[in-house]
Amino acid sequence: MAYEHINTTDSLNTGRVKLNKAIDAASNAEVISQKSDATSVRAEQKADAAVTHANSVQEQFNQVVIEGDSSVEAAQARVRADGYSFTTLQERLNNSDAQLAESEKDLNQSKSYFWTSNFKNVQDPFLYTPDVFYQLVEGLTHPYATLGSIGKDQSEQYNVRFWKYEPKNYEKTIFMIGGIHGGETYGSYFISNLFKMLLDDKVLVPPQFHYLKEKVRILAMPIANPWGMSQNPKTRYNSRGVDLNRNFDWKWAQQPDDVPFGLKFKGESPFSEKESQYIKQILTTYNIDIFMDLHNHINAANEGYDYVLYGDTNTEKILLELKNYMIRNITNPNGLFSITQNDASSNNYASAVLNIPSVNIEGLPGNHYPRGSVDDINHNFDTFGNATRLLAGYLTRKNNKPGFYIKQLRKSYADGALTLSNNKNTDLSDSVFSFTPASDGYITLNGYVVAKQSVAGDFFAGRLVAEQPGYIMQMSTIANVYTNGTNPILPLNTVLPVKANLPVNLKILVVNEGTGNCTIKRFSLTMLFNEGTNLSSTDELEDYYYV
């Protein structure tokens, strides 16, 4: 409020009244000021206390996130759902961020029938010694894994490593070996990287390998001939000059004879060498469903081979599927494909004598890319990796016998012969198939559809329709699988339990979602029926319901 000034015309008494009012007002202002100062001090004290408390909370947070607080709750927060424990909560958060960042790639790739290798930090494996391969998994631990040795090699200089990856509820067992010929290193490189991918929880496993990681026991001898791989130059033979892959007890006597370190020296007798004895020991000790011997063809580039695959009647159709993938972009493919069993090799012994479905897969260094380059290694890892997952997916653990092959449908169309109506679901009539299983079991369906689109921005979509009326049906809300591009390839796969004596109906449904022209170029659908328990997970059946 405003106070009156003393004027020259005021009487003495009037001036006294005005002066007293001013003095009273000043006194009141001082009291208010003192109260404000006290309030300010209290406020400052509270602010200081708040800062101190905030610093304390921040320090506690730092302890939890950065330094690894030992409290029960913080410790629980550092443990992932699958039981893997991170050193700090911050490490787990960083790992989760990385997984989220890759999730879109992961989801896109999960739609792909075949796996595409994308290793970046790789080197020419011909330059590697056994120790370098072993270092890829050194220091890695996993509750499913045991990394050890089975014994000394024939030279008594080197341990023959034997690795085991055994999920709690595994459904089948694969035994794979590499480097039985010491100069062939690509198989050893693949096995070492496969185990690194399975054991290292910081490495994101491709979607196509999730089943392998959770349901397949993998036994591995990454380098079956460490002496031969340790020589300079590397050699095909072991320390006694024996070609170990001619030292097995299958048609051994019929093999040509030679001298030690000669091209065809098969040893003094079947299993005369420790290295081949170890392979036999594993083959006969464990209940093995699939045996894989991984090589690389030394002269692949000179001979122009696009595939070199050896198998048996159990694995023939799987290898044909792999072969078709390997030559998918090659106009006039050239290669070797055989299911005969003419030599005393490890895979022939496993197949012919022990009745274990077996393959010999040859990597092909330098046949399409410079040998040892990143593209060359990934190209060969594609072959080994897809062979592994195809074999794991097609063969069951029931008496070491493969699933009963039902039918393979393939159809190619002339350009423009089969044109889709836009935004309308269309059944591929050539894919419609029905059969009635004689026993309970499950069907495995794998295939693809190739289209041609005039507008790259259009989406090509579709799905497998697989139902058994009276037992299991697809939900009406099931989503299509999507892809795009001017020449889109749509991967299709599913696993479905079935009952005996009820017809199973199968077909491929496709649609072009867009405004351009879309024609079907070709499709392939492989159907297998297996007796026994369904191996699919509940997630794979989420789009179905039981009648």
Image: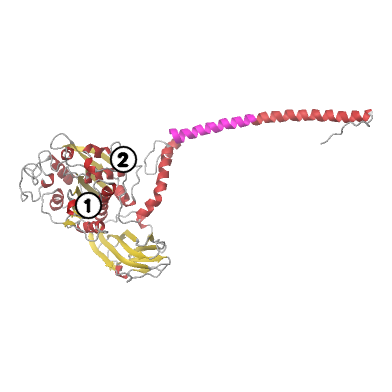
Q: The disc labelled 1 sits on which kind of residue?
A: Asn
Residue at image mark 2: 143
- Residue at position x 34%, y 64% in the image: 451
Q: Main secondary structure of the magenta part?
A: helix
**Disc 1 on helix, strand or loop?**
loop
Mark identifier at residue 50:
none
Instruction: Tell me the kind of residue under disc 2.
Output: Pro
Q: Position of residue 190 (x, y in %)?
A: 25, 46
For the N terminus, the image quarter is top right
Q: Nearer the viewer, residue 70 or 458?
A: 458
Q: Where are the magenta residues, as a range?
A: 44-68
Q: Is residue 453 above or below residue 365?
A: below
Tell me the distance, in whole angstroms, between the alpha carbons under discs 1 and 2: 39 Å
Give the quadrant of residue 76: top left
Residue 430, x across and y down, in percent? 29, 69
| Percent x, y of residue 525 | 28, 63
Which residue corresponds to mark 1?
367
Pointer 2 local density, CA inside 10 Å: few below 14, some 14–19, many at least 20 = few
Residue plotted at (38% across, 51% down) = 105
Quarter location, residue 69: top left
